[in-house]
Amino acid sequence: MVLTVAALRGALGFLSRIPVGGGEGDWEAFRRTPAAIPAVGYPIGALLALPVAAATLLPVRVPSLTVGVAFAAWVSLVTGITHLDGVADLGDAAVVHGDADRRREVMKDSALGVGGTLALALVVVGLVTAATVLADVARLSLVDAIVIVVAAEVAAKGATATLVCVGEAPHEGLGSALTEPSGPRALVGVALATAPVLLLGWPAGRPGSVASVAVQPGSVVPIAVVLTAAGVAAALVLAWARSRLGGVSGDVLGATNELARVVGLHAGVIAWTLS
């Protein structure tokens, strides 16, 4: 599928709170172009990295935990909390005893249960702790810290787009609106939109103006680990959704985005530390 300005604008409008305008035509272009999902992960990821970069460049040392909390709050501000609703709904469904119909019924309930509360807490804590370590990474290599954030966002979006291509919705709704126009063939476009993030790991691709800030050599290994970890997270969510919910709903897609981001961030930090 060919990426168009309308599809990209629709993706930004749907996946973030960036004021890009748009209308029904942009939404239609977006939902028929899964590749637009990882494509907008690049600008969104760069925007999400601002707290980490700002804390590093300030003349005073900002506590790493403060950076972590600011990062988690900034993620919600930039991307909204719609996807977190999916995390909460899946958390509630995960602790319910019964069949797929019973779990889907619980997911439609606006009340937040223990399972949803725990799932939300784990995601938020995951963001805070990952960014806390990223703040330390940034003091050694600002470029690498930013690259990890961007890679995790692109990977999370690529994982979500993959589920759009291979998943089937169990009922009418947002899930069906996104999955029905696409199919496995659209995975080619998703891969082509996601793969360029690996180029951020090559030292030759690093901006020379910040070479003095980055003391660690660039490497594609942490980025590859981020992509792999996000893919594994998405595969696990897909397997669970098919067996417990009967398919991929809008909540499943939203939760995949949030879970894959957290997993990708932690995987990237670990890989960077070991490289």
Image (cartoon, helix red, strand yellow):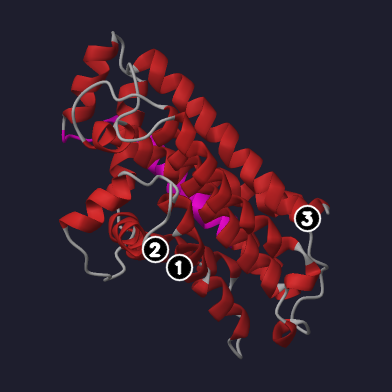
Q: Disc 1 and disc 3: Cα gap in Å? A: 22 Å
Q: Earlier in the sequence, mark 1 or mark 3?
A: 1
Q: Disc 1 and disc 2: Cα gap in Å? A: 5 Å
The extreme top residue here reads: 99
On the image, the x and y values in percent for residue 124 come to 44, 50
On the image, the x and y values in percent for residue 147 come to 64, 64
Label 3 is placed on what type of residue? Thr
On the image, the x and y values in percent for residue 174 come to 23, 37
Disc 2: CA contacts within 10 A as few (<14), some (14-19) or many (>=20): some
Residue at position x 21%, y 64% in the image:
22
Residue at position x 57%, y 41% in the image:
230
Disc 1: CA contacts within 10 A as few (<14), some (14-19) or many (>=20): some
As helix, strand or loop, the secondary structure at mark 2 comes to helix
SS majority, magenta:
helix
Which quadrant does the C terminus fall into?
bottom right
Q: Earlier in the sequence, mark 2 or mark 3?
A: 2
Label 2 is placed on what type of residue? Ala
Magenta highlight range: 110-131
Disc 1 vs disc 3: which is toward the camera? 3
As helix, strand or loop, the secondary structure at mark 1 comes to helix
Q: Which residue is mark 1?
A: 70
Task: Give the left or right position of residue 222, taking residue 265 as reference.
Answer: right
Q: Which residue is mark 2?
A: 73
